[in-house]
Image (cartoon, rainbow, N blue to C red):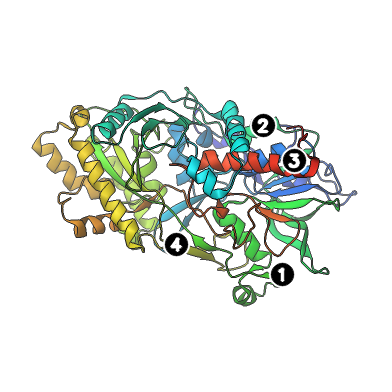
Amino acid sequence: MHQLKESDKGSVHGVQYDHPAQYRYPFIKPASSFSPDPSSPALTRRPASSYDYIIVGGGTAGCPLAATLSRNYTVLLLERGGTPFANPNVSLMQNFHIALADISPTSASQMFISTDGVFNSRARVLGGGTCINAGFYTRASTSYIKSVGWDDKLVNESYPWIEKQIVHRPDLIPWQRAVRDSLLEVGISPFNGFTYDHIYGTKVGGTIFDRFGRRHTAAELLASANPENLHVLVHASVLKIEFDTTGKHPRAVGVIFKDENGKKHKAILSKRSGSEIIVSSGAIGSPHLLLLSGIGPKAELKKFNIPVVLDNKFVGKGMSDNPLNTIFVPSKTPVKQSLIQTVGITKLGVYIEASSGFGQSKDSIHWDHGIASAEIGQLSTIPPKQRTHEAIHDYRRRKRNLPHEAFKGGFILEKIARPLSTGQISLINKNIDDNPSITFNYFSHPADLARCVDGIRVVEKMLKSKHFAPYAQYDKDVVEKLLNLSVEANVNLIPKHTNDTKSLEQFCKDTLITIWHYHGGCHVGKVVSSDYKVLGVKGLRVIDGSTFTESPGTNPQATVMMMGRYMGVKILRERLGKAAGV
């Protein structure tokens, strides 16, 4: 199955739907089905007059959280995007780049450009980032779990809950084996085999793509919900959280959201003790919603005439994105497509990963470069501040005329593990559908730049290892041809002067792209407490990657999903005692 033609698509309430199978579970409905007025002719009336939990954001954390809380309480899960089911751009690995390249309003991804000039994406679909990422599944380190203060036992029960449902062991292709063996040869050892654990050395991790190249997302974790208690609305954009401000501390009491037709609705929180609104809208969406709801720096809120519910200067601050730099390794023969399978966890503060080949179907974007594709904004051969939508269109137009050498091969990816450079998000307007202003200040801390240089030197050693010889034995003419084509083809070859630190630093800055692992904006101790309750407010939590000061593991999705399950169980145990039936 490839992309569906327009004639195959239906339309409900003005929103295009790909297939009737999009509503896989009976509790998923379009937002317009929510009727606060008993006389309303909407599709169905809401199943409850109020809810024990209202979760804003049906993403990587929100889905497992909703499924877990619904075992004992009524839950309303509000997702601004559509569903991933029956959407081939989400489901099929060969179409990985298409969802990210689609910048239409109904796409599963929402593109943004940070003020640094780097193109990036946010998820806008039930299942969140698990629907548009490269699929790699790996846990956080034990030291990370300890530093966050999570309970070891519950963490080690929560990861397997995810793994049994949607995680698979990858079928390692020869390219990934060459990466694995070269990592070991250059000293990124020992080899830890196939494991979910985060340990120094080289390993093969899990994936949410099955052996047929089909993606399994966090939305499938909703299958574990109590269907009697869970109500999921898609195309439900929450505009603001409502508060009762008559008491000593503001209390969250409900949310205002709009449906796919633009009609506004109000969802009300139950008055039962312990009921909460939980924001799980991601590292950009969560601080953005708090700001629009009146929680944030007073001066910024007043500038946009937003009534101040709580003055907190830390909302939206401390944002980080892990810088990514890629090196293209040309191959004499075609290389099968792969996303992330092998990773080198170094002691230098960098992670080395790899991707290869390109997905091509008759409806696909031809000659894409997967994770490093120009058409998804990964314009690594133009310095960040010069990147534009026009440049993307230029690449798309020119690439069909490029010789096949520019596409045969794979990429070695170098990611900075714990960037010290931080930025912030701030409001541009009061429209929840628009991206706020986002700044990451990549490489503003000298230590991040030094680690990038170290990482490029590791990659250089890998390319000199015997394991890449079968791929890289080109004659001089072809190498010259590729060097001349590299900018046009949007691929970076290993720099010539790797002993020149200054020139490598410039290379790092100029070829910087993202691996979409941004985090922060609602940090523990500054915006939320250690149990993720918003400080100074009652009945409101934030549970997602916006609370992280550091991205967990080499790739964060496993831990964000685990966190949703973990916090769901923790909340149930607090309310019901240890006997909580989960």
Location of mark 4 (residue): 422
Location of mark 1 (residue): 309
Of the two numbered discs 4 and 2 on the same chain, state the one appearing first in sequence.
2
Q: CB under 8 Å between callouts 4 and 2?
A: no
The CA distance from mark 1 to mark 2 is 42 Å
Q: Is residue 14 visible?
A: yes
| Residue type pointed to by label 1 | Val
Which quarter of the rendering shows the C terminus?
top right
Point out residue 163 in the picture as x, y percentages from the top left corner.
56, 29
Q: CB under 8 Å between callouts 4 and 3?
A: no
What numbered label is drawn on residue 20? 2
Circle 2 crowding by C-alpha within 10 Å: few under 14, some 14–19, many from 20 = few
The CA distance from mark 3 to mark 1 is 30 Å
- Dot in front, 3 or 1: 3
| Residue type pointed to by label 4 | Thr
Say which of 120 and 258 sits in front. 120
**SS state under label 1:** loop
| Residue type pointed to by label 3 | Arg
